[in-house]
Image (cartoon, rainbow, N blue to C red):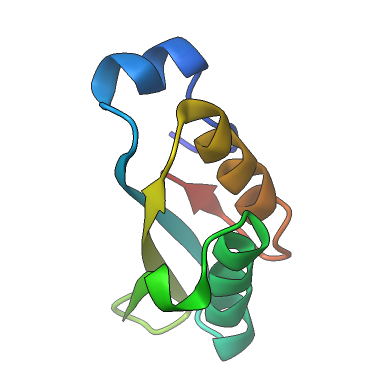
Amino acid sequence: MTTRTAPSIAALEGAHDFPCPYTVKAFGPHEQSFVDAVREAAVGAGVAPDRVTLTMRPSSKGTYCCVTVSVPAPNAEWVQVLYEQIVAIPGLRTIL
């Protein structure tokens, strides 16, 4: 299933006790520009660059990658802003 929207406020608040660490996985092209764009999306949503934890794992054929970004989330509304920032990245295939 491809997801391109943020979970609802109710779902986020039901699953998390904010403020808390929050993790998003973005799947897109295996290119440094995509990885950088995910990092910039978190910074653009208001996270200090030194508070962004990012890992990348390429697909078996190397065509795509999964970028996992972990950030401190102050509230559910902020998580929705983060999703909006990441969904706007060119080449995004799926966001979880």
Q: Nearer the viewer, residue 89 or 49?
A: 49
Q: Position of residue 91 (x, y in %)?
A: 67, 65
Quadrant in the picture for the N terminus? top left
**Above or below for 92 versus 48:** above
Quadrant in the picture for the C terminus? top left
Q: Position of residue 52 (x, y in %)?
A: 41, 69
Q: Residue at x 63, y 73 (%)?
A: 37
Residue 36, by quadrant, is bottom right
Q: Residue at x 38, y 57 (%)?
A: 71
Is any part of residue 52 visible from this angle?
A: no
Q: Residue at x 47, y 80 (%)?
A: 63
Q: Nearer the viewer, residue 79 or 29?
A: 79
Q: Nearer the viewer, residue 89 or 12?
A: 12
**Above or below for 56 versus 26:** below
Is any part of residue 92 visible from this angle?
A: yes
Residue 67, by quadrant, is bottom left
Apparent side of residue 91 relative to residue 58 in the rendered image (left or right): right
Q: How many labels sit on residues? A: 0
Q: Position of residue 49 (x, y in %)?
A: 51, 76
Q: Residue at x 67, y 62 (%)?
A: 44
Residue 46, by quadrant, is bottom right
Apparent side of residue 90 relative to residue 67 in the rendered image (left or right): right
Q: Nearer the viewer, residue 37 or 60?
A: 37
**Above or below for 41 versus 1:** below
Q: Position of residue 79 (x, y in %)?
A: 51, 38
